[in-house]
Amino acid sequence: MPSSSAHEHESHYVFDILFNNTTDIQPEIHSTDTHGTNEVNFALLHLFGYQFAPRYKDLYDKVRTSLVGFKHPSQYGDAIIKPVRKAQKEFIVSEWDNIQRIIVSLALKATTQSTIVSKLSAYAKAGVKECWLVLGPERQIEIFVAPKKNGFSSQSLHGPGGRVRSTAGSEFKLGLDALFSEVESRIEPEQTPVLLS
């Protein structure tokens, strides 16, 4: 079981705890208080066959500010609990390749939910203008820019044969083939991705 400090958000460890459970008890439903919830966990746990059933301190306040659906709120008729906004389906579709890569990395245990979230959040909170996630086995580099409260506003994915330029320091350019050769010589395939900032 991963360890966390009192200052870390419990929700960043929910998937890791369930997916790395080695006991004879194999839960199908996970319930937690408000501190163990985030919007990603609903989708992530569903994709891995778990039901996420959080208990909210103030359900109506949470629904009023955070519930998202795939239809416009007006299309839910007389439902007692309705979404307040429509999900950004176009964004999900446009980022589906990246989402699948993250899901596969988690499924193969090449990285953990807490590692991805904590590193990106820490860099964003520290005001790091740009963060490069080097995916050695996939020979790809994902660049995160424009830090915000809990992550980055923009990301892009680059593959072999190209060159990338830093937005934080425009004089810094990198040939990706050279980078991947260096990364492959330094890490084992089962190690977690390398974060460069």
Image (spheres, rainbow, N blue to C red):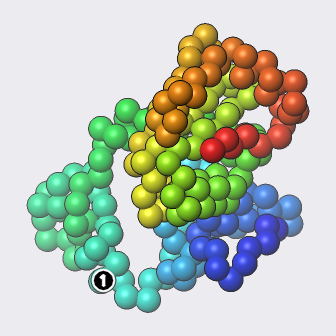
Q: Residue at x 64, y 74 (%)?
A: 8
Residue 103 appears in the figure: no
Left/right of residue 110 with respect to residue 13 in the rendered view: right
Answer above or below: position of 124 versus 129: below
Residue 52 appears in the figure: yes
Closest to the observer: 77 or 135?
Answer: 135
Q: Quadrant of residue 68?
A: bottom left
Image spot of residue 89 (x, y percent):
31, 43
Image spot of residue 178 (x, y percent):
72, 16
Q: Residue at x 61, y 10 (%)?
A: 161
The quarter in which the C terminus is drawn is top right
Closest to the observer: 97 or 30?
Answer: 97
Q: Quadrant of residue 6?
A: bottom right
Image spot of residue 137 (x, y percent):
75, 26
Image spot of residue 126 (x, y percent):
56, 62
Q: Secondary structure at mark 1?
A: helix
Residue type indicated by callout 1: Asp
The quarter in which the N terminus is drawn is bottom right
Q: Look at mark 1 in the image and give the residue it sits on.
A: 61
Q: Residue furthest top?
A: 161
Answer above or below: position of 71 versus 103: below
Answer above or below: position of 122 versus 53: above
Left/right of residue 129 with respect to residue 29 in the rendered view: left
Left/right of residue 86 with respect to residue 124 in the rendered view: left
